[in-house]
Amino acid sequence: MYKLTICHLYPDLMNLYGDRGNIITLSKRCEWRNIDVETVTVSLNEEFDYEKYDIIFIGGGQDFEQTIIQDDLMRGKRQRIIDAAEEGKVILGICGGFQLLGKYYKTQSGSEIECVGALDLWTCSSEARLTGNLVFECDFLKSQTTDGYVVGFENHSGKTYLGEGVKPLGKVIKGFGNNGDDGFEGAVYKNTYGTYAHGSLLPKNPALADHLITLALLNKYPEFQGLDPLDDKLENLARTSVIKRVLADKS
């Protein structure tokens, strides 16, 4: 039997807009396929041994919570997150978690707050807040969905820009995405994914959840042949309905 271990980093501090639903979705979609799954929570002053985990998740948080965990990250977890990304562990960061995976966050006063540096990206604070429903297109999901669309909700004042070796997660169809300027959303580096899509992300987008599960299984079990299909009729009806409503909104 296959087994995956999921690490939820800072679940008590980084859980805006139901981000915990991403963990629930990953767990249930494994269980429904008889894949043994364990979720481990790691927070402040707790040991983070990335080699024990197959999927690492960090959700979104407000500036206050991000400041708290930043100190903890820099005291020891930082290098382990970098090593996990370089070794191809599956990592998903949402909003604040996405920003923290980058090199720095530049405040409106011009000071730079150092971040983990696992991804070559950076974020600059802006006066305008980028908020609303978000739809973006992922090319790698077009084999599982007819359109490759991912739907979520964004609410961020930071504008994120990607450096060398980091690809966008998708192309914005509706909403702002990383910065409201270049038309891209999120970031991908090896098996590390970052996005501004809350809502929560994975329950609304089962194909993306399965993509992450597949990467984790391939990373751990080279002989893995692929996931058994699930009856996602209701999930896909809900997803399609939300996407149609968002795209029909002229505001």
Image (spheres, grey):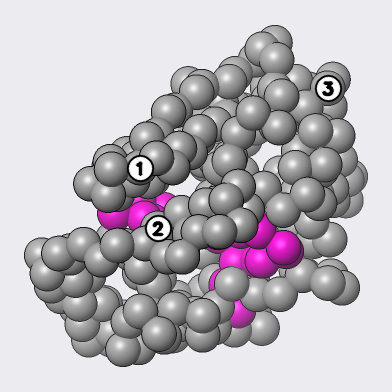
Tally of numbered discs: 3
Say which element carries label 3.
helix
Q: Is residue 189 magenta?
A: yes
Tag 2 residue: 209
Separation (CA) of disc 1 from disc 2: 14 Å
* Few, some or many residues within 10 Å of mark 3 (<14, 14–19, 20+): some
| Depicted 187 relative to depicted 53: above or below | below
Q: Residues within 10 Å of mark 1 (few under 14, many from 20)?
A: some
Q: Quadrant of the N terminus?
A: top left
Compared across the picture, whether 217 is left or right of 173 comes to right
Quadrant position of residue 58: top right
Q: Measure how far apart labels 3 and 1 are at the Cα level.
A: 31 Å
Going by the numbered disc 3, the residue's amino acid type is Gly
Name the residue beneath numbered marker 3: 76
Q: Quadrant of the C terminus?
A: bottom left
Which residue matches tag 1? Answer: 35
Residue 229 visible, this angle? yes
Q: Crowdedness of circle 2 by 10 Å Cα count: few (<14), some, many (20+)?
A: many
Q: Eyeballing the image, is 180 above or below 107?
A: below
249 to the left or right of 60: left
Q: Earlier in the sequence, mark 3 or mark 2?
A: 3
Secondary structure under tag 2 reads: helix
**Residue visible at 44% across and 28% down?**
39
**Residue extent of the magenta highlight:** 184-203
The three-letter code of the residue at mark 1 reads: Ile
Q: Is residue 131 visible?
A: no
What is the x, y in percent for residue 212?
Answer: 49, 57
